[in-house]
Image (spheres, rainbow, N blue to C red):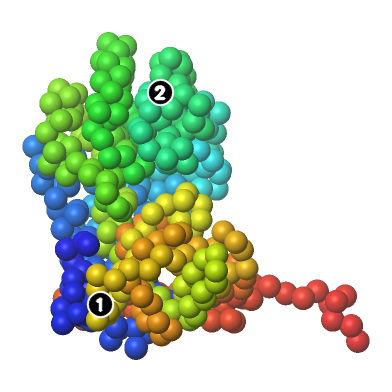
Amino acid sequence: MPNSFSYRDRLLHCEGLSVAQMASQIGTPFYLYSSQSMQEQFRAYDRAFASIPHVICFSMKANSNLAVVRLFVNEGGGVDIVSGGELFRAVRAGADPRKIVFSGVGKTRAEIADALKSGILMFNVESLPELKTIDRVAQELGLKAPVALRINPDVDPHTHDYTATGKKESKFGIDLDQAMDGYRLARSLHHLEVVGVDVHIGSQITEVEPYEKALLKVKSFVDQLRREGFGIRYFDFGGGLGIPYKDEKPPSPQEFAERVLPILSAMDLTVIFEPGRFLVGNAGILVCKVLYVKDSNAKSHVIVDAAMNDLIRPSLYGAYQEIIPVSLPAEPDRRVTADVVGPVCESGDFLAKDREIPPIQVGDLLAVLGAGAYGFTMSSTYNSRPRVPEVLVRGEEFHLVRRRETFEDLVRGEEIPVFLKGD
């Protein structure tokens, strides 16, 4: 269990507050985040790389709540974005545009223009057509666009196929054997400034070896760029450092740094890191309530008020999320096997399959751990279910940083045309 969550008097607490008491005031389901945990993770990463110039740009696709982004901005961090909406959020949260990097394979002209006007640090360019588009948009605005090309080093990160981004067949980045042509093209375009090199091999990576392989390949390429006279200033090393969901044993930031710092130091560049899940994943839980317990000859189902539209990782990836009771049962060692499922009308709506859990009763509260990353950001209103609140804890106080949506929110922006309204 993450450090900021613990049992006291048999009740689960987040920092100094009882989760059950918060649930009684907020209602369920809701996302609950520990500010202490997020700060500790950020500072651990920052300390590990203190010996080299660096910027930690929070990958906000993991958790884009304004309060969460602002927490990392207050720690001195920047932001890694992948859309115009994330740019808007980052600026609204107070991020310094000079610490914003714009990644992603499908940047639109409007998004590029907004980012240029904002004065972001750089674009991580994913293809040669994108490079030309950024040049044209910069020309129209009378600006020069700072760019880094995202190199695909063809390294297997040993993670889920859906979160591997550095293999040759991936949609992300430019193949290493084509990258030099890309840099030469960038230098020939008058409204681009080549400032860096980018690599990002995947997410939820629990070994250092894939990073080392990618890094050695890219360092050799950077050396070649310098021989050709490119004035590279930044190396964006991406993110992807994993967290323990079940029995994974990812390296700590210090262990990670000890392995890669010798190579990074020799590159003599300002290094940009883009951690996301590492900073927020185990800082958050999803709190839900048991609605029904359904037993049959074939299977036992614990039906809760949270569903795949609230947390889709188990359904989408088959991801494991630990589930614990908010109140410890009288017989904590006794176990039953059940599926923990939600109310959504899909057979794929589950939070856990064949999970050993303590005996559960209607009305019990459960906490789904490791839900701070790719939880709310991937949620939807499927089955016309309003999205749930987000709550941030600081010591012995909690703050509602996103209210629960209403039914009116579900239909905001919709309109029945006149021809359907009749007389």
Left/right of residue 201 with respect to residue 381 in the rendered view: left
Q: Residue at x 21, y 61 (%)?
A: 2
380 and 50: which is toward the camera: 380
Amino acid on which the number 2 mark rests in the picture = Asp
- Crowd rating for badge 1 (residues with CA inside 10 Å; few <14, some 14–19, many 20+): few
Q: Residue at x 28, y 86 (%)?
A: 21
For residue 272, above or below residue 413: above
Q: Residue at x 56, y 59 (%)?
A: 348
Q: Residue at x 25, y 28 (%)?
A: 209
Per the rendering, the mark at residue 331 is 1
Q: Which residue is mark 2?
A: 154
User: Quadrant location of residue 415?
Assistant: bottom right
For residue 199, above or below residue 48: above
State the image coordinates of residue 26 (x, y, percent, origin top left): 37, 84
State the image coordinates of residue 27 (x, y, percent, origin top left): 40, 84
For residue 278, above or below residue 305: above
Amino acid on which the number 1 mark rests in the picture = Glu
Left/right of residue 362 with respect to residue 328 in the rendered view: right
Quarter of the image with the C terminus is bottom right
State the image coordinates of residue 40 (x, y, percent, origin top left): 15, 58
